[in-house]
Image (spheres, grey):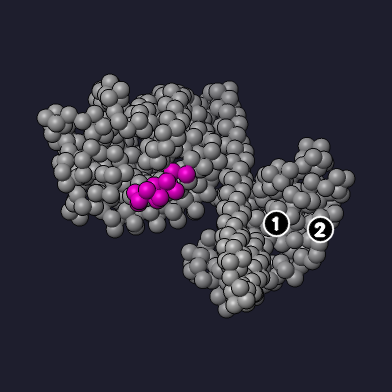
């Protein structure tokens, strides 16, 4: 752990509204030290806050006392709900004396976090909304960033991924702007968590791994422990048990070194989940006993539910049905109250299996139906929110480019106006100079226009393959669907089978070359007015204007049959790649979002059917048609 120095934090003294400079007021210096220490050593942060309060008692300052107590509230919110509420009551009483009005948003945020830890998400959201409004009204960027971070995390937890992503991205930008990079790293962790909840585990793992490295280099041990736990969860969903166990073990070691009870408990739950997944229920139960003992020292209701879910799964594997039911029903209550669809679906599935073991077929069928309904609801929500999130990012990027162009044009106009005014006061020589300047400005405008066209082409092109990117294809498809009386339009979503294994076995360079050669093959097959684009990862999309379902199916099957002919022997030896394809056709008043959702569902069906095949999914007013499939009868584990 690197030494803590007040000099790191002096810029925050002015930003955070302290009464004196940090070198004049030791209480302020201690508070700033405690702010950083909360991410490195929470116990040291608590000590800093308590020492600051001792100084403030001799030299009263309402603003500094509120900030010191907010540090204690942050500390206790994970450990002692009653102690956290005492700090909230004390800061609320001080607010009328505070000079910095944004501190009220900080109090509301800590109150919401305490309620969220206790499982009361509804009232927590009310506090977070009010905190955002208060911080916005008084233009307190630090308090606004913290409130947006907490609200965004809770929104994502409740399935509002697009709104949650919007909040945390705003929070990240604010922390970057006010030079609080450690807080920005924490927010980046939450962005990864939202990707994980949307089912994009590989993207989440990539972000977690990058954040963990930066946190390790900065000595942020508490935050690194949290990131390792999240990374382990993502790898658990990817079925990488060894890597997940290593991540959870790393989280446990860091948490033990910090005496971070909540971190230790979550790490042990993760290790128990790995034990359940690798057929070691007895080991999982022993680990969960340790986690339950630690959980009794923290007010985290969600943690208790996670323990009960893992415990129920282990007991079910050991044929101890009655005990498993008791644990799973406790988990079900908490997850249902929190509207946590992912964990709720897993809990229902476990309950169905327990009732099946006990011979209660009626209850087993009911819970199996509940699990199926919850999983479908989660999947549809992930797809809808994934598209909504991408649309928000696309709209934001478009507005930023438009604003940059307007600023550039305004600057050029201002320069031209200045030169014109000078030209009115000068005679022949100045007129000649003005003409030269006009020629220069004309050249700059032409250069800007060429640059703008070039930038637009780059913004619409996938860097790796040179194919149009997701934005380009979706924009074109949306325009086709909005045409009045337009004939049907079909889309194909193409996914390389087992692509992850290529990256894992041969490296990402071979994976990139595979994507490029597939793009060449697809370009040869797709001719105008059809449009090829890369959705991201190993997914491609083909838009077929004026094409009905039958022709789209035939075209998809031709592509499926041609892909194994790609010569990859130089890199893959005898291995041939195959693709799975989802096909759908537009219906009346159809939308891009709906078509993508259906095509994705068809693609999932192709994966379930064994890969290397074509499947369709149509709107309810269109008759569905099954497509020939060369499926290998291997079990489906996931897309890829």
Q: Residues within 10 Å of mark 2 (few under 14, many from 20)?
A: some
Residue at left 58%, top 70%? 426
The image position of residue 427, as x and y in percent, is: 61, 73
Q: Give the residue pinned by disc 2.
A: 554
- Seen from the viewer's position, the closer of residues 467 and 494 is 467
The image position of residue 150, as x and y in percent, is: 41, 36
The image position of residue 257, as x and y in percent, is: 20, 46
SS of the residue under disc 2: helix
Q: How many marks?
A: 2
SS of the residue under disc 1: helix
For the residues carrying marks 1 and 2, which lies nearer the camera in this image?
Answer: 1
Cα separation, mark 1 vs mark 2, equals 21 Å
The image position of residue 162, as x and y in percent, is: 55, 41
Magenta stretch: give its range: 170-181
Q: Is residue 309 above or below residue 189?
A: above
Q: Is residue 61 above or below residue 463?
A: above
Is 473 placed left or right of 229 in the picture? right
Is 125 placed left or right of 611 in the picture? left
Q: Residues within 10 Å of mark 1 (few under 14, many from 20)?
A: many
Q: Give the residue pinned by disc 1.
A: 473
Residue at left 24%, top 49%? 10
Quarter of the picture holding the C terminus? bottom right
Asked if the stretch drawn in magenta spans residue 171, the answer is yes
- Seen from the viewer's position, the closer of residues 80 and 199 is 80
Asked if the stretch drawn in magenta spans residue 423, the answer is no
Confirm or deny contact between disc 1 and disc 2 (CB under 8 A). Answer: no
* Mark seen at residue 289: none
Q: Is residue 292 above or below residue 573?
A: above
């Amino acid at each position: 752990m690197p030494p803590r120095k007040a000099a790191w934090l002096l810029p925050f003294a002015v930003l955070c509204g302290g009464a004196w400079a940090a070198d004049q007021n030791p209480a302020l210096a201690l508070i700033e030290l405690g702010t950083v220490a909360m991410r490195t050593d929470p116990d040291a942060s608590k000590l800093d806050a308590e020492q600051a309060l001792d100084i403030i008692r001799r030299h009263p300052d309402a603003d500094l006392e509120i900030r010191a107590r907010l540090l204690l509230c942050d500390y206790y919110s994970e450990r002692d709900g009653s102690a956290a509420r005492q700090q909230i009551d004390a800061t609320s009483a001080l607010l009328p004396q505070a000079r910095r009005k944004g501190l009220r948003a900080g109090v509301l945020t800590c109150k919401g976090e305490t309620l969220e830890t206790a499982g009361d998400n509804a009232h927590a959201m009310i506090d977070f909304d009010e905190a955002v409004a208060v911080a916005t009204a008084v233009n307190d960027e630090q308090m606004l960033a913290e409130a947006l971070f907490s609200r965004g995390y809770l929104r994502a937890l409740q399935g509002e991924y697009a709104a949650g992503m919007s909040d945390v991205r705003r929070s990240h930008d604010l922390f970057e702007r006010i030079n609080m990079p450690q807080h920005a790293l924490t927010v980046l962790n939450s962005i990864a968590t939202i990707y994980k909840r949307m089912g994009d585990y590989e993207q989440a793992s990539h972000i977690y791994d990058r954040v963990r490295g930066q946190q390790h280099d900065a000595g942020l041990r508490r935050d690194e422990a949290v990131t390792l736990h999240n990374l382990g969860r993502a790898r658990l969903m990817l079925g990488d048990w060894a890597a997940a166990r290593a991540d959870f073990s790393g989280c446990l070691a860091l948490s033990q070194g910090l005496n971070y009870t909540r971190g230790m408990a979550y790490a042990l739950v993760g290790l128990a989940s790995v034990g359940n997944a690798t057929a070691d229920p007895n080991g999982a139960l022993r680990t969960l006993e340790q986690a339950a003992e630690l959980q009794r020292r923290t007010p985290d209701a969600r943690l208790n539910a996670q323990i009960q879910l893992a415990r129920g799964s282990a007991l079910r594997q050991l044929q101890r049905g009655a005990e498993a039911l008791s644990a799973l029903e406790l988990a079900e209550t908490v997850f249902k109250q929190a509207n946590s669809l992912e964990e709720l679906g897993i809990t229902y599935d476990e309950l169905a299996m327990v009732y099946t073991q006990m011979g209660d077929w009626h209850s087993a069928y009911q819970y199996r139906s509940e699990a199926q309904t919850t999983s479908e609801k989660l999947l549809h929500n992930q797809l809808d929110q994934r598209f909504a999130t991408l649309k928000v990012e696309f709209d934001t990027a478009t507005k930023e480019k438009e604003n940059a162009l307007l600023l550039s044009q305004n600057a050029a106009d201002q320069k031209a106006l200045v030169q014109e005014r000078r030209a009115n006061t000068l005679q022949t020589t100045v007129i000649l100079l003005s003409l030269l300047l006009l020629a220069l400005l004309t050249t700059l405008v032409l250069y800007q226009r060429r640059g703008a066209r070039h930038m637009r082409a780059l913004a619409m092109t996938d860097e790796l393959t040179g194919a149009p990117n997701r934005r380009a294809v979706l924009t074109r498809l949306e325009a086709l669907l909005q045409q009045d009386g337009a004939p049907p339009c079909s889309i194909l979503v193409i996914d390389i089978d087992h692509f992850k294994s290529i990256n894992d076995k041969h490296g990402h360079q071979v994976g990139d070359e595979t994507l490029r050669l597939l793009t060449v093959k697809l370009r040869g097959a797709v001719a105008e007015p059809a449009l090829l684009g890369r959705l991201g990862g190993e997914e491609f999309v083909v838009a077929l204007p004026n094409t009905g379902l039958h022709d789209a199916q035939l075209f998809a099957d031709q592509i499926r049959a041609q892909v194994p002919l790609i010569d990859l022997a130089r890199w893959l030896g005898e291995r041939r790649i195959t693709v799975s394809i989802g096909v759908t056709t537009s219906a009346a008043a159809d939308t891009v979002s709906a078509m993508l959702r259906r095509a994705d569902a068809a693609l999932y069906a192709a994966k379930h059917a064994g890969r290397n095949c074509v499947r369709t999914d149509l709107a309810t007013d269109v008759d569905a048609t099954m497509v020939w499939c060369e499926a290998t009868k291997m079990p489906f584990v996931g897309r890829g």
